[in-house]
Amino acid sequence: MNKKVKKVIGYGLVSLMLCGPVLVSKVSAEESGSIQTTAQFKNHKDGSQSIVGKTMPNTKLRIGYDGTIETVSDGEGNYELKIPEEKKYSKLNGGTINIYKVENDGSSSFQTSTQTDFEAPQLYNTDVISPRLALKIDESTFYAFDYHGSNKVEVKMIFEDGKTIVKDSDENGSISIDLPKLKTVCVVQADAGLALPDFTSSERNFQLISQVIGRVGRHSSESNVIIQTYQPEAPSIQFGLNQDYTGFYNFEIKNRQKQNYPPFVYLLKLTCVYKTEISAVRNSQKEAHKIRKKFSKDVQIFGPTPAFYERVGETYRWQIVVKSKKRAPLLEIAREFQGKPQWRVDLDPPGLI
C-alpha cells in the first residue's frame, strides 16, 4: 500500500469543500431490546411527500404534538406518514418535523425529528433523498444512500457516463466503497470527537482515521492522507495513522478497565422526555432517588444530568446512567420503567450520547 500520510496542525477556522468517499455507518434502530424511532423526509417523483422510518410494531404516530397527520406502523415497525397535498412542505415553511407517539389515552410523547429538504439531487429512477444521505461529486456524479429495512443500506454510485453501481451493506448497515481514482482524502478537525462526553469517543476517533486511510492507497497510484488536528499526539490519531489495531486495543482496554466501563461492567441508560424542563428535572430526580433507595448496594448511579442533546424540538431530555458488574439488577431496574411512556430504556447502549 503506497501512502503519504501528512499531519497538519491547524490554528483557527478551517473551511474545506471535500469531494470524496464516505464510509456509511447507519446507527441500528434496535438496541438491546428497545427500538428507537427513526424518520426520513422524502420528496417522491410524483410530487408527493411523506416521512418514512421504523419504530415499535403496531405503534400509532403523528406529526406534531397535537397534529392530524397520523399512521400506525406495521407488524415489523415500518411506517409512512403521508403528507396531504394541502399541507405539503416548501422552502417557505420547511424546517424541523417532530414525530410523536400517540398513547392509549390520546396524549403524545416525542419520539424523533427530521428535516425537510428541497436541495437534494434528483437521482435517476429514484426519489429525492436527504442531503445527509447523498454526497455530490460534480454535476452528474454523486453517491446516494437509501435505507432498506431497519439496518441494511443500499448505495447507488452514479457516474458521468451514466454507469450505475449498486452495492448493499452488511446487516449492520456498514459498507466499504472502492474508488480507484481517489488519491487524496482529508480529515478536518480530526480531534473534535475526542471532546465528546462518551466512553467510546476515542474508539470512534480511531475508527474514523483508520477507515479514511483505508479508502486510498488500494491501487498502484500514489495517494495522500491529510489529517488536520490540534492533538497530533492523541493515541487514537497515532494508532489510526499507523493502522495499528492491536496497539489501539491494548491502549483502550486498559483505559476502559481503569475507568470501569464496558466490557468490564454493564450499562443502563435511562432517558426521560418531557414538554418542559422543570418536568424533566423533577421526574428524573424522583426516579433516581427511587433507584438509589432500592438498588444502591448492587449498582453505581450517575445523574440525573441533562442529556447531550438536552432540547430536541419541543421537548427536554434528562438521563440517568447505571453501572453494574452484574446484568440482573439492571434488568430489574429496566422493568421498573415499563409502562412509563416518558422514559426510554437502553440496556447495553453503544454509547452515552
Image (spheres, rainbow, N blue to C red):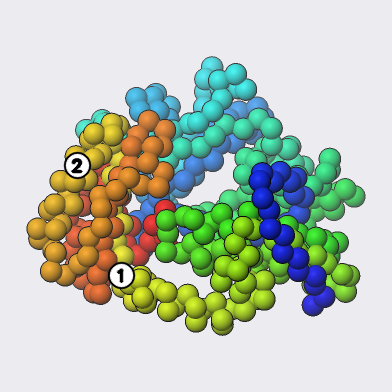
Residue 298 placement, left or right of 259: left
Amino acid type at image mark 1? Tyr
In this view, the residue in front, 63 or 311, is 311
The residue that appears at 35% across and 34% down in the rendered structure is 315
Q: Which of marks 1 and 2 is nearer the N terminus?
A: 1
Q: Identify residue for label 1.
A: 266
245 in relation to 143, above or below:
below
Instruction: Point out the residue furthest to the left here.
Output: 293
Secondary element type, mark 1: strand
Q: Identify residue for label 2.
A: 283
The residue that appears at 39% across and 24% down in the rendered structure is 68
60 in relation to 289, above or below:
above
5 in relation to 75, above or below:
below
The residue that appears at 19% across and 60% down in the rendered structure is 333
Secondary element type, mark 2: helix
Q: In this rendering, does residue 28 appear at all?
A: yes
Query: In the image, which disc is placed on residue 18?
Result: none
152 in relation to 312, above or below:
below
**Residue 169, percent across and down?**
62, 62
Amino acid type at image mark 2? Asn
Instruction: Point out the residue furthest to the front here.
Output: 11
Image quadrant for the N terminus? bottom right
Residue 302 placement, left or right of 238: left
